[in-house]
Image: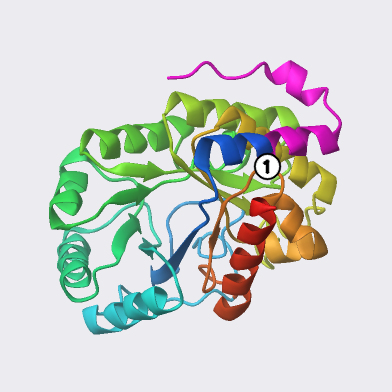
Amino acid sequence: MNQPPDITELQALPLAELMRQALATKLARRGASFSLCSIINAKSGRCSEDCRFCAQSAHYQTEAPVYPLQGKAQILTAAREAQKIGASRFSLVTSGRGLASDDLAQVLEIIRAIRKEVGISVCASLGILSESELRQLKEAGLSRYHHNLETSREFFPQVCTTHSFADRVATIKAAQAAGLSVCSGGIFGLGESEADRLSMAMSLVECEIDSVPINILIPLSGTPCAGLPPLAIAEILRAIALYRLILPQAAIRLAAGRESALADFLSSAFMGGADGMMIGGYLTQRGRSPEADLQFSEDIRQLWSI
């Protein structure tokens, strides 16, 4: 594992220089790759966990939809649509601490069907699972498991009390032991400090994560995070650039909140280290149209080549 850069020196850099170095690092270490992925909210609502940002938690009164695990035909249709709009990966996401045995059996069948009938790479975000369960997913055709750290080890108790940061790390390690790639990142704007964001980045280095989704808080009505003030655009861009320099070989994927938080400065994030996006909407929120995101990704590739 490569030695991470001196974070104190990076923090002292002006934003423009930090972004310049981040883009240079991205192009040198990852070339002009720009990855697109898509998710389906395959099971929604009534989650037992109390993550303060989440509209699907049963602890809060929100307008998030509630439904059981969707059927195979419905998910196959979504997988085909994801492939059609340009996603190279399709992820099944379920609410809840983990999966009941009957849901796991159904998910295994769905993964096999997607790999056979659609062919797109399949990822999943199914909560806290054992290594045995993760091995079953791998054998069914799953290539990557998604399990966010969400925030720093230090700040995590302010975000969730029904499970721990250590529980999340243990699930990541179990997925890796099962032979799966792991996608893990978090949410900026939960009330954390820059030190917390950097601490999370270092935890991702320690966990040897090669795909890092960055969400920017959408303060949803009914959740404890509803009244949190938005991060300044400069603060978000600094964080993205720092993540690129700390994790030079990882895919840095912008996900929920990128449109509302960055607005006209979205392209700046990709000129400062980011190189992937989630398209087709998020768990309970809609994003931009796939056509707009596809055109955007082509425009960024052209800027990178100049």
Q: Residue at left 40%, top 74%?
A: 82
Q: Is residue 215 above or below residue 154?
A: below
List x then y, in percent, for residue 40: 41, 71
- Residue lying furthest front: 306
The residue identified by callout 1 is: 240
Whether residue 62 can be seen here? no
Q: Residue at left 82%, top 51%?
A: 233
Left or right position of 161 against 73: right
Q: Is residue 305 above or below residue 21?
A: below
Q: Is residue 47 magenta?
A: no
Which amino acid is tagged 1?
Ile
The colour scheme used here is rainbow
Q: Quadrant of residue 70?
A: bottom left
Q: Is residue 286 above or below residue 53?
A: below
Along the line of sight, the residue nearer the viewer: 162 or 75: 75
Left or right position of 49 against 20: left
For the record, the magenta segment spans 1-23
